[in-house]
Image (cartoon, rainbow, N blue to C red):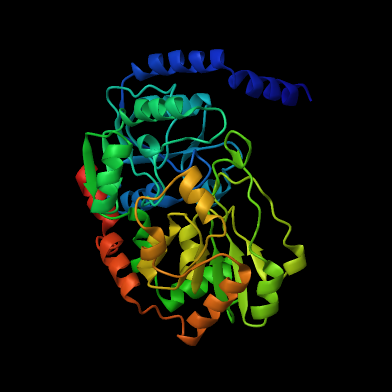
Amino acid sequence: MAGIKLKKLWKRWRGISIAQRIYHCFFKVAGFLPPKKKLVMFESFLGKQYSDNPRAIYEYMKLHKPEYTLVWSVAEGSEKPFKEESISYAVRFTLKWFFYVARAEYWVTNSRLPLWIPKPHHTTYVQTWHGTPLKRLAADMEEVHMPGTTTDAYKKNFHRESKKWDYLISPNAYSTEIFRRAFQFDKEVIECGYPRNDVLYTENNPEQVAKLKKRLGIPSGKQVILYAPTWRDDQFYERGRYKFELTLNLHALRKAFGDKYVIILRMHYLVAENFDLSPYEGFAFDFSYHEDIRDLYLCSDLMITDYSSVFFDYANLRRPIIFFVYDIETYRDKLRGFYFDFENNAPGPLVKTTGEVIEAIRKYEEANFKVHSEAFENFYERFCYLESGQSSHKAVQKVF
């Protein structure tokens, strides 16, 4: 009992500014220790997942660079996939973690690290980021509506972080131009496609999909709809925990398609909701906490999303995408704004009601889920042209 109380007190003390200053000083001292050559620290989405570009690079290096020591930075409570796969890891902010991160020769992450972490002079910081941008980023944002910050502070802090990056991975020329300006990044951009999308080419076959469905418990005899929306900057409980109202009517979808479809939900990692799907048992499944969305891409026949960057990745599969954008005016004009004419150039229909979603699904069903349109082909050629299953190889060869 006393141990639990001490742990709670430690967590509370750890969160205040003086603790961060102590962390910073400790990290500075640890950074003067001899570097551990060929030690690579990986982190995905603040240590909450085993996923995304860092995972793809890790898996490639594990096979092709056995001389490197590969260790993951993991948030407390997110250790399960690392234990199951027997992956070396250190829990964030523990003593073990400090020494690993401070002595590592390389950092590979897809999101920002805490600002109080100084980058040792011996460390090469590889920022992979986590999506082709539709919505405005960092310095390009006119107003920031996130809790716990202001527009000026957000942009200033973002630039303080991006100055530490040595390499930035980009999926295409469009992203490179935006990343350089929005992140104020003037070092080397590795424009090679996204490593995380390699599996969409190397594992997109019936045998692999069947194995995935069996492992995940997704019915094999039905079509699969993936619903993967993003978060809203101005809808939150607190900093880092965002609200999400499930506007998509699951009852209407089950009534229309329940005999031959299932729907799997994948919320953004910042969304704090736990949806009660018990009324839709056997039809709706929540995979928000599954370690990597790439498995859900492969298992699904059709995607419903909104403004999330997932649709840039999913387009590699040449499968249908429906954009459920019930709040597009607010999102476009108030929250973020878009980098291109989304309404006229999206690789699928934009709809605002569940009824329109159902109608769009039926049209794709009639076309046997094939995507044949000039808009889609133009989109594919602009954003997916570097993807071929070799992006991890290209990134690793450049950095390591």
Quarter of the image for residue 345 reads bottom left
Q: Looking at this view, is 30 or 398 the one in front?
A: 398
Q: Residue at x 45, y 17 (%)?
A: 24
Quarter of the image with the N terminus is top right
Q: In this view, does 48 lie above or below 29?
A: below
Considering only vertical position in the picture, is 207 above or below 162? below
Horizontal placement of 365 versus 281: left or right?
A: left
| Left or right relative to 377: residue 283 | right
Q: Which of 316 and 176 is in front in this view?
A: 176
Q: What residue do we see at 77% from left, 66% from top?
A: 279
The C terminus - image quarter: top left
The one of 184 and 87 positioned closer to us in this rendering: 184
The residue at the point 27 percent across, 62 percent down is 382
Left/right of residue 242 with respect to residue 333 in the rendered view:
right
Is residue 205 positioned above or below 164 on the image? below
Query: In the rendering, at what x and y percent does residue 233 appear?
Result: 54, 42
| Relative image position of residue 169 (x, y in whole percent) | 29, 46
At which x and y percent is residue 22? 50, 13
- On the question of residue 330 being in view, the answer is yes
